[in-house]
Image (cartoon, coloured by chain):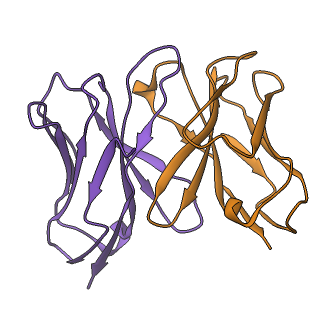
Amino acid sequence: NAGVTQTPKFQVLKTGQSMTLQCAQDMNHNSMYWYRQDPGMGLRLIYYSASEGTTDKGEVPNGYNVSRLNKREFSLRLESAAPSQTSVYFCASSELRTYYGYTFGSGTRLTVV
Amino acid sequence: QQQVKQSPQSLIVQKGGISIINCAYENTAFDYFPWYQQFPGKGPALLIAIRPDVSEKKEGRFTISFNKSAKQFSLHIMDSQPGDSATYFCAASQTGTASKLTFGTGTRLQVTL
């Protein structure tokens, strides 16, 4: 009964380094999302994947790339990390209609120094 | 461009009191309005949701009130308990093939003894 699993839970990067945040869901959901959470700014959508094989930009996509590897997995990549990308990143999944709500992972706390 | 405005930013309520959090939206195409509850170190979790064809929805001590003409909705927590202390996010979306949620900025609720 894992739901949405994110790895790693914590990460410190130096400016310019790259990394990939991993997300996997076991609920057979079609749609997956990446949000970032910053104090006073709520949750902002970075990228989403409505279904396997599709990805689209959200509100704040600059500096990020995503891959929908299969129906279960959706990864977020930072090619050249910047201090402005210091944040808590959440992955979520849902059915195509959100009447059933999103299921969120427990987050990745990323610090870029 | 903040499509969902949430207030207050923080709220302190005594045990047994009523907590009220308000949200306003701009996009009249939104047709799904959930509230999420987030405890420290955890991902947000769906608390309660409403669609615009009803003006109120109640689940236990939690009630959503919805005013379509004013484009506002609010969360009322009756008989607030210390265990309700968390951050609450309102959200809105337009259903479709990719029902992306737009979140408010969050309200940090503290329920005191």
Instruction: Please state, as top left, top right, bottom left or bottom right, where the N terminus of chain A lies in the image.
Output: top right
- Residue pictured at 87% horizontal, 69% vertical: A14
The letter of the purple chain is: B
- Residue pictured at 16% horizontal, 21% vertical: B53
- Residue pictured at 34% horizontal, 41% vertical: B3
Question: Left of A50 or right of it: where is B88?
Answer: left
Q: Is residue A74 visible?
A: no
**Camera-nearest residue between B84 and B36:** B36
Q: Is residue B38 above or below residue B57?
A: below
Q: Quadrant of residue B87 in the image?
A: bottom left
Q: Is residue B89 above or below residue A14?
A: above
Q: Is residue A53 above or below residue A8?
A: above
- Residue pictured at 29% horizontal, 24% vertical: B31
Number of callouts in the render? 0
Q: Quadrant of residue B61 in the image?
A: bottom left
**Camera-nearest residue between A90 and A82:** A82
The colour with which the image depicts chain A is orange
Question: Left of A22 or right of it: where is B47?
Answer: left
Q: Is residue B7 above or below residue B112?
A: above
* Percent coordinates x, y for residue A40 in the rendering: 44, 65
Q: Is residue A44 visible?
A: yes
Q: Residue furthest right?
A: A17
* Percent coordinates x, y for residue B70 in the rendering: 10, 37
* Percent coordinates x, y for residue A21 in the rendering: 80, 48
Question: Left of A16 or right of it: where is B50?
Answer: left
**Camera-nearest residue between B107 and A111:** A111
* Percent coordinates x, y for residue A20 in the rendering: 85, 47
Instruction: Please state, as top left, top right, bottom left or bottom right, where the C terminus of chain A lies in the image.
Output: bottom right
